[in-house]
Image (cartoon, rainbow, N blue to C red):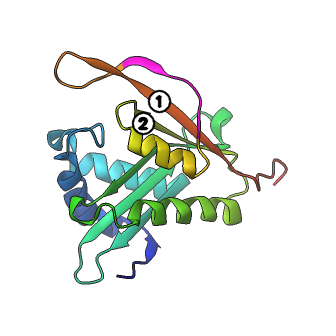
């Protein structure tokens, strides 16, 4: 099946909310529970990403359902103007392992290289038990930058580390 990537807009909020609710039911994926995925949370991420970052979406070609989304945005202190952070990617459980995550990441990073030369780095954080994701991010060019020990409470009174990672834009132009 052929999928296309497009930029998100605020009219996508309901379908993005439904996608996040579906994905949040999978243990070990995104850090939010289904109850924490609210319309306010989704609108806030969309606005920040549209205003000073990037949000990309993959629609199901067979219906009006959004099946994957990735976003990141600048943090508010100006000392971080060269950074896109808070990166989150979600893929509908029924469409996982079909290359949509790779498609979204490659589209995001290509867009940054070609159109966002003011961005030097893109940051994400992955829980240490998600070794499949960490390996995937490394294959895309992300580098592990350390460990946040005992940062994730996995709900069983056991804690695991968060692994901060960064990708660097080869086309960064400091003097824009």
Q: Quadrant of residue 167?
A: top right
The residue lying furthest to the right in this view is 175
Count residues near mark 1 (Cα–Cα under 10 Å), then give few for <14, some for 14-19, many for 20+: many
Q: Residue at x 23, y 73 (%)?
A: 65
Magenta range is 143-150
Q: Residue at x 55, y 24 (%)?
A: 146
Q: Which mark is residue 126?
A: 2
64 relative position to 102: left or right: left
In the rendered image, residue 122, in percent from the top left (x then y), is placed at 59, 45
Q: Quadrant of residue 143?
A: top right
Q: Are marks 1 and 2 in contact (CB under 8 Å)?
A: yes
| Vertical side of 150 occupied by 125: above or below | below
| Vertical side of 4 occupied by 136: above or below | above
Q: Residue at x 76, y 52 (%)?
A: 172
| Vertical side of 172 occupied by 127: above or below | above
Residue position for label 1: 163
Q: Quadrant of residue 161?
A: top left
The mark that comes first in sequence, 1 or 2, is 2
Q: Quick one: SS at disc 1?
A: strand
């Amino acid at each position: 099946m052929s999928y296309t990537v497009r930029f998100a807009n605020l009219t996508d909020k309901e379908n993005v909310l439904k996608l996040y609710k579906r994905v949040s039911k999978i243990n070990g994926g995104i850090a939010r529970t289904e109850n924490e995925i609210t319309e306010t949370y989704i609108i806030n991420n969309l606005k920040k990403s549209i205003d000073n970052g990037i949000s990309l979406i993959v629609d199901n070609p067979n219906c009006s359902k959004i099946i994957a989304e990735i976003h990141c945005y600048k943090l508010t202190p100006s000392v971080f103007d060269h950074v896109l952070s808070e990166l989150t990617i979600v893929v509908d459980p029924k469409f996982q392992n079909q290359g949509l995550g790779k498609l979204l990441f490659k589209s995001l990073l290509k867009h940054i290289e070609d159109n966002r030369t003011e961005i030097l780095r893109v940051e994400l954080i992955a829980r240490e038990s998600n070794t499949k994701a960490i390996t995937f991010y490394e294959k895309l060019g992300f580098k592990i930058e350390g460990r946040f020990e005992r940062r994730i409470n996995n709900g069983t009174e056991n804690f695991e580390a968060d692994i901060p990672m960064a990708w660097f834009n080869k086309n960064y132009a400091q003097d824009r």
